[in-house]
Amino acid sequence: MGRCLMLLVLLLVPVFAQSTPVRIGSKVFTESVILGELAKATAQQAGVDAVHQRELGGTSVLWKALQQGDIDVYSEYTGTITHELLKNVAPDADIPTLRARLQPLGIGITDSLGFNNTYAVGMLADKAAQRHISRLSDLAAHPELRFGFSNEFIDRVDGWPGIRQRYALPQTQVRGLDHALSYRAVASGAVDAIDLYSTDAEIPYYHLRTLDDDRHYFPRYEAVYLYRLALAQSAPQFVTALQKLAGRIDENTMRQMNAKVKLHGMKEDVVVAAFLGIRADTRADKGLAARLLQTSIEHIKLVMLSLGLAVLLAIPLGILAARLKRLGQVVIGLTGILQTVPSLAMFVFMIPVFGIGTWPAIAALFLYSLLPIVRNTHAGLVGIAPELRESAAAMGLPRGVRLRWIELPLATRSILAGIKTAAVINVGTATLAALIGAGGYGQPILTGIRLDNIGLILEGAIPAAILALLAQGVFEGIERWLTPRGLRLQARQ
Amino acid sequence: MAIAEARRFGFALERASKRYGAVVALNHVDIDFSAGSTTALIGSSGSGKSTVLRLLLGLDYPDEGTVRVDGQPLGPSKVLELRRRVGYVIQEGGLFPHLTLSGNLALLPRYLGWRAQHVQQRAEELAALTHLPLDVLDRYPAELSGGQRQRVALMRALMVDPDALLLDEPLGALDPIVRHELQDELKRIFAQIGKTVIIVTHDLAEAAWFADRLVLMRDGAIVQDGTLQDLLDRPAEPFVTRFVEAQRRLPEVRS
């Protein structure tokens, strides 16, 4: 066990040591990834080495990683900062206020990049022009308009009920729609206005006009970069360049960039290069085989390391549990509780301890692997027929010898079945590890979901399924090989 | 004679009681098994006869009273050493299914550091004693008949030449012909090895076949301790007669 710990430390050292390049994070949606690429290109222009850890899950992952110094920069929205990240701050606090509140945390904030990505109401541009509608308050004069709002927007107090009251809107034809369908509904004329996010890629694609929130009802979601203040010492030129991006991207520009990636299949770095007027660095682009090789190595590494460590701990725990009844129930109960923690939450819980990347993912998968192995080891040992256990004891062999020569061999099948279960669960769960920057088959799946690209989803999903089957097959082989022949004969009778 | 005496030892229970939950398995039992004697414990299931063996082997400890082995009280510190000096055979043999017969036989000798050659030699001796064909030693327990399994269980119990042999219904699971055959062989073996033997059975005829001294138990207590003749002629209480008469004879058939 001590040797394992040492190995763990040795393996971790290089991870902590190579902290020289600036690390940029992004959330798992396109706009965030584009802004991540923008920060990276900006750093490189300023002569600072940078890496982009893309698609790191949601706000909580990025915020924790930034606070802990696992990443140095990511893009955020002021509304999110006031609602979710800081406590006791006015929902409409301005950026200087936020800057003062973030400083004690060691975190800096740029000025607004120039766009506000908030809820908005949109109409076909032609239709809006015909009726001279450009602001939300203009809607009051057109009670015949039909609205199609997402269900969430209809229900939220700060959604439809709120704007209806603020703008005294008279419309009665309001329908709940799935957000994915609402663009098509408004384009086909089935409804006249829909709710949307103001930088959605579909806005230019469907020629929509977003109506001005002239009474400032919706909260402001100004795009900003959050960065670690320590960067001002380690990479001052980068911080300066980052601050210069303020005010350079208006809503329309952001929409166009989102559209190029999401609707036209362009790569984020190419879009960003075009925006900055530089050439994209395409050397890093890889073919399918190279990508598969990389995700496979990452994925298998996650599964094997977590499973290996779990076996080292879970088998002794299972033995202990079988020997000491009361403690056994506690151990099995605790590992059972671990199993009930939702996977994503488990990955996020690991961030404060291990940061982001491979190790927190391995730690989470390790914890998930414990239960099946502990339980099967325990079941295999307590399931040994009492007369066999008694015969072993009556021989006068000490406990340790009985365990090694008799009890563990008799429990082999059950233990291996537990490891097999853990392996198969691990292969599946490890696809979520991409959300905390561990890569693996989850990476193409995340990108595929984000870009609505079935091919990319399959690029992760198919190998993951194959790996699960492979793990199953390999462990069945090991089971056959390790199960003593006498037990197989016995099972046949 | 004095040398032979030193190689054998006796057992005793003094006022021993054992409870399993609400069930009283033994109730203040006093009994002595002298060195070199052969004793049969008889009684119905649940009478406490198996519990006596378990206490003598230190597989359980009495709630009250003392277990004496070779005159010394038995405690946890000496129990492993004691068990190595006592062979134990149970109804289904208790052979380990993951090991071949040789593997089963070699367990204790291997732990005691015997050379493989020595183990093999001893196994062959015992195979001769129990009339087990040598070629089955490489098989697994699952590949044997019930009678062969019991022979191997007996061999395993005798491997390191123990000073005593405790058998708990050793023939209980066998068919009548094999059982009869093994009864003959066991009796011969007991006579040949001259060890302290305690055999548990619920069959009076089998008990009388193996041992002169019969100990009849009921509800965790000893009802009568004596010869078959004592049980027949001088029953200590009506239960003894009932137990004796419960053994079924062949019905009369007209010839």
Image (tube, coloured by chain):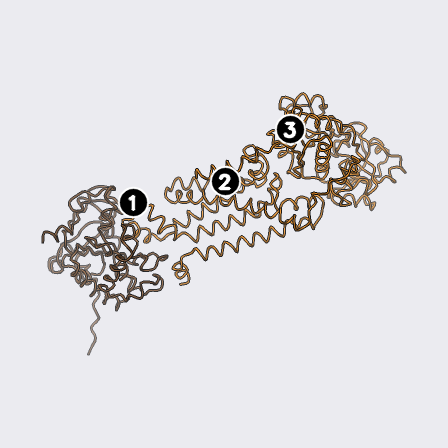
Chain colours: A orange, B brown
Question: As drawn, which residue projects farthest toward the bottom?
Answer: B255
Could you tell me residue A161's position as x and y percent? 74, 33
Q: Mark 2 points at which residue?
A: A337
Q: Which residue is drawn at 83% across and 30% down?
A: A137
Q: Which chain carries label 3?
A: A
Amino acid, disc 3: Leu
Q: Name the residue under label 1.
A: B22
Q: Is residue A450 above or below residue B241?
A: above
Could you tell me residue A46's position as x and y percent? 72, 30
Q: Name the residue under label 3.
A: A85
Amino acid, disc 1: Ala
Q: What element carries label 1?
A: loop
Could you tell me residue B17's position as x and y percent? 22, 44
Look at the image and tell me in which quarter the N terminus of chain A lies.
Answer: top left
- Label 3: few (<14), some (14–19) or many (≥20) C-alpha neighbours in 10 Å: some
Q: How far apart are marks 3 and 2 (CA)?
A: 28 Å
Q: How far apart are marks 2 and 1 (CA)?
A: 35 Å
Q: What element carries label 2?
A: helix
Q: Which of marks 3 and 2 is in front?
A: 3
Q: Which of marks 3 and 2 is nearer the N terminus?
A: 3
Looking at the rendering, which quadrant does residue A277 occupy? top right
Q: Is residue A296 above or below residue A80?
A: below
